[in-house]
Amino acid sequence: MNSFFQNARCRVLRAGFVLVVSGLSLAAQAAGPLAHGKVPGVGDIQVSADDVAADIQRIPVEVRPQVLTQTKTMNQLVTNLYTRRVLAERAHVEGLDKRPDVAAALALARDKVLSDALLAYVVDKGNTPPDDKALAMAQTMYKADAKSFQMPEQVRIRHILIAPGKDKDDAAAEKEARDLLAQLRSGGDFAALAKAHSADPGSASKGGDLGFFAQGRMVPEFDTAAFQLQKVGDFSDLVKTQFGYHILQLQERKPAGQQSFDEVKEALVAKVKQSEVQKGRNELAEQLEATMKLDEPAVKATIEKLTQQSAAAKKP
């Protein structure tokens, strides 16, 4: 199998795809269209809840909740969909959908939506093992490769970072860090002080908690100080790194050893299901490729023509 097909299969059958809100129809839940209007020369135009649900899929999953809570942004999204639909209908009235290049683009867009739907709702669903079978396969995987589940010693650390900045030179940062360390050693609330003073936004909101990590994960100075702490609750002295001055406290220590199946069960079951789904996609790709006859001279001629057109378009 040549690289052309490998790349094509990767794009078409190996990429994951999330369809509109798990196939739920939002239009049925809405009282009517989210936007509508009568456009001269075009007619009635509507934007439905399903249209919005489909469009929202292009926004990364991790950002989506934030976008959905911003009324102004969502109103603009609906407005954009309405505008685009008006323009599309006007293009149809003008007969632009009959142009060969536009017709080809429309066909490709249709192919993508329908092929993604088939993969998600038929192919992937048919190849996803039921929970009990996936669990059994995960247990087999765990037993067959026990060494890969060996974990090194880990520590759970929380810290406070005081960083020099425009309004605080290095000496001032060090003094502030020493004052905080004195408060902590006198019984100060670590979590409260971290939330109020730490310059590490990723951990400050969690009271300075960095979770568990093994040696080699942090910058050297921080790493060394973290693993020197022996008793839960112990504080480090000030630790200076490229980021500023840190105060560390040991919360937990986890010895080296093999992770239990229960610890990795969820991840292994997910891995098994993903693997079976991908196996199904690969088999389908091979079946479909076996039905195709590739006209390599025609492909070469098309490449030459497109290259010439591209070069001509660059000329002033």
Image (tube, helix red, strand yellow):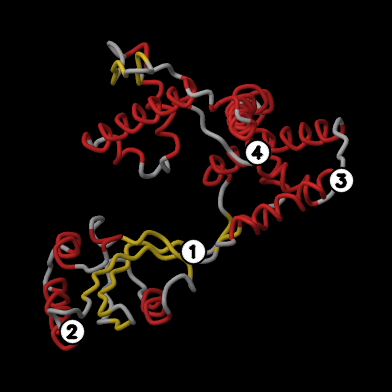
Residue type for callout 3: Glu
Residue at the far bottom: name it.
171
Q: Which mark is residue 174?
A: 2
Q: Earlier in the sequence, mark 4 or mark 2?
A: 2
Q: Give the foreground label among 4 and 1.
A: 4
The disc label shown at residue 225, or none: none
The label shown at residue 255 is 1
Residue at 42 percent across and 41 percent down: it is: 61
Kind of residue at disc 2: Glu
Quarter of the view holding residue 14: top right
Of marks 1 and 2, which one's residue comes earlier in the chain? Answer: 2
Residue 296 disc label: 3
Which comes sooner in the sequence, label 4 or label 1? 1
Q: Nearer the viewer, residue 158 or 153?
A: 158
Please report the residue visible at 83 percent of the width from the left and 31 percent of the height from the top. Answer: 287
Question: Quick one: SS at disc 2?
Answer: helix
**Could you give the CA–CA distance between mark 2 and mark 3, rounded to whole angstroms?**
69 Å
Say what amino acid the circle numbered 1 marks.
Pro
In front of the other: 68 or 168: 68
Identify residue for label 4: 272
Secondary element at image label 4:
helix
Q: Position of residue 51 (x, y in %)?
A: 40, 24
Circles 1 and 2: CB atoms closer than 8 Å: no
Classify 29 as above or below 159: above
Alpha-carbon span between mark 1 and mark 2: 33 Å
At a point 35% along the width and 14% down the height, the residue shown is: 44
Q: Earlier in the sequence, mark 2 or mark 3?
A: 2
